[in-house]
Amino acid sequence: MDHCTGFTSEFRDITDPDGFLWVGTLNGLVRFDGLHFSGFERDGPPELQENVQKLARDNKDGVWIATITGLIHYAHGGFRAISIPGSPPAHIEALARGRMVVFGSSPETS
């Protein structure tokens, strides 16, 4: 992870079982360890540098990240992009803890 020099407009935040604070911003995902904010410019998929819309933890201590273009799951120190059926990009309406429920729809075009 690279040191994050700045970010704007916090949208969502959650704390994981290890005590890290995850923050979704207009400029991507950052994690706070109690002393430093770190971004994922090198260690994550490119979608993590986008507008993070929603964050949620699952029952297995994973973190779900909904961005403006998709869904990413973080577990065991790694990120995995999740394919959502339909015409990309899907707009994630909600993430729920427990059973992971994802409601998605493509943005309407005119």
Image (tube, rainbow, N blue to C red):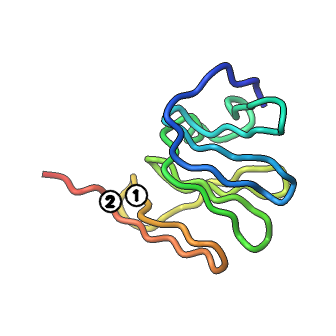
Q: Name the residue that disc number 2 marks.
A: 106
Snapshot quadrant of residue 63 = bottom right
Residue type, numbered disc 1: Ala
Q: Which residue is drawn at 48% across and 40% down?
A: 51
**Percent x, y of residue 50:** 51, 37
| In this rendering, position of residue 49 left or right of residue 37 | left
Are the residues flagged by discs 2 and 1 in contact, CB closer than 8 Å?
yes
Q: Residues within 10 Å of mark 2 (few under 14, many from 20)?
A: some
- Residue at 67% in and 54% down: 14
Residue topped by disc 1: 90
**Residue 6 x/y as whole percent:** 62, 22
> In the rendered view, does 67 fall on the left or right side of 3?
left
Taking the spot 62% from the left edge, 50% from the top edge, the residue there is 13
Residue sticking out furthest to the front: 34
Q: Is residue 94 placed above or below 23 in the rendered structure?
A: below
Q: How far apart are marks 2 and 1 (CA)?
A: 4 Å
Mark 1 packing: few (<14 Cα in 10 Å), some, or many (20+)? Answer: many
Element at badge 2? loop
Q: Where is residue 82 in the image (x, y as percent from the top left)?
A: 59, 60
Q: Residue lying furthest bottom in this view? A: 99
In the picture, residue 41 is in which quadrant?
Answer: top right
| Three-letter amino acid code at the position of disc 2 | Ser
